[in-house]
Image: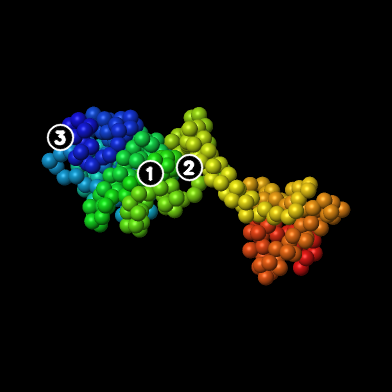
Amino acid sequence: MDLRSIKQRFDIIGNSPELDRALEIAVQVAGTDLSVLITGESGVGKEVIPQIIHINSPRKHNQYIAVNCGAIPEGTEVAELPLSTQVRLLRVLQSGEFIKVGSSKVQKTDVRVIAATNVNLTKAIENGKFREDLYYRLNTVPIKVPSLRERRQDIHLLFKKFALDFADKYMMPPVKLTEDAVIILESYRWPGNIRQLKSIAEQISVIEHSRSIGPDILEKYIPKETPRNLPIRTEGLGSDYLTDRDIIFKILYQLRQDIEEMKAKITAAEVTTTVSQPRIAGDISDNFGEHSVIDYDTEEDSLSIQDVNADLIRKALEKNNGKRKLAAQDLGISERTLYRKIKELNLD
């Protein structure tokens, strides 16, 4: 079965090399009885790989059993099985033998084990939470399913597919993204991968009245990210880290937003009087967000900056009936800075 047929049968969307490589390995190993270990982040679609292997294997007419390790006490995925259970699984993999609970009779089984996890098993071994011998038994053939940020060219394709699906489900026209919205969609890190993308596509399809989705609408559904909390890629590290291109893309976009917000604050904070020699006073905070642009006459040259600030603060408070939040907005500073100035100038 070729890749195109596999994608059609299992409703797989995407053409990234990383995705195609994972599918190719699954098909190649299907005809053997080798154990397979599938790794990848939560939400990438790891569960489809065992089905592809089974349907292309000599066992395809036999029973396919998917075991949710969350149903096993203390275990949530194969990487977190209790050590006692790991020993039993290792015995099955090595000899095909097992003993039923409450029995002393050894029985034989003929099964093929395909395991999946989003846990870093190497670290689990180092921490004594996973047996090294079991790891090598399971990891005979490794298959890594790429994260969504590793296949960015597929993100918009997936969104359009989900939008069409939800349009059929809810009997409404499909939503479409503008070019600017597509840029935002593809630059986001997608920690929840395909599951998160599908959820957002459904929310937008149901909640928004407009069928044309621009950046302003899309940003309401995508969690905020700033350059400060982006992980930096380092050589030798895995896919949990952004590439240099991702970081630059995100920083440029964030800076554009910061500049627009700064312009709006400066415009709102300007206090105009008869000006002969304008001066600038006020606070510029470390986070770019607090600005105060103040012009005053040369007749007040003898006044200190504190006096000028005190006078402006009093006027702003009088204008807003003592409401400090509104006064701070008029002055173009944060409410926290206003509180500090009031304390420094003894304006209480």
| Residue 208 position in % (x across, y down) | 36, 56
- Labels 2 & 1 near each other (Cβ < 8 A): no
Q: 5 or 54, which is in the foreground? A: 5
Q: Which residue is mark 3?
A: 58
Residue 115 on image: x %, y %: 30, 41
Q: Which residue appears at 30% of the width and 33% of the height?
A: 15
> Which residue is labeled 1 in the image?
178
Q: Residue at x 23, y 56 (%)?
A: 171
Looking at marks 3 and 2 on the same chain, the residue that comes earlier in the sequence is marked by 3
The amino acid type of the residue labelled 2 equals Asn
Instruction: Tell me the number on the disc at residue 278.
Output: none
Residue underneath mark 2: 127
Disc 3/disc 2 C-alpha distance (Å)? 38 Å
Helix or strand or loop: what does disc 1 sit on? loop
The one nearer the camera, 62 or 256, is 256
Assess disc 2: are there few (<14), some (14-19) or many (≥20) residues with their C-alpha within 10 Å of its C-alpha.
Answer: few
Q: Amino acid at mark 3?
A: Pro
Q: Are marks 1 and 3 in contact (CB under 8 Å)?
A: no
Decide: is 299 above or below 118: below
Mark 2 or mark 1, earlier in chain: 2
Q: Is residue 148 visible?
A: yes
Badge 1: few (under 14), some or many (20 or more) residues near its Cα, within 10 Å? few
Q: Position of residue 239 (x, y in %)?
A: 43, 36
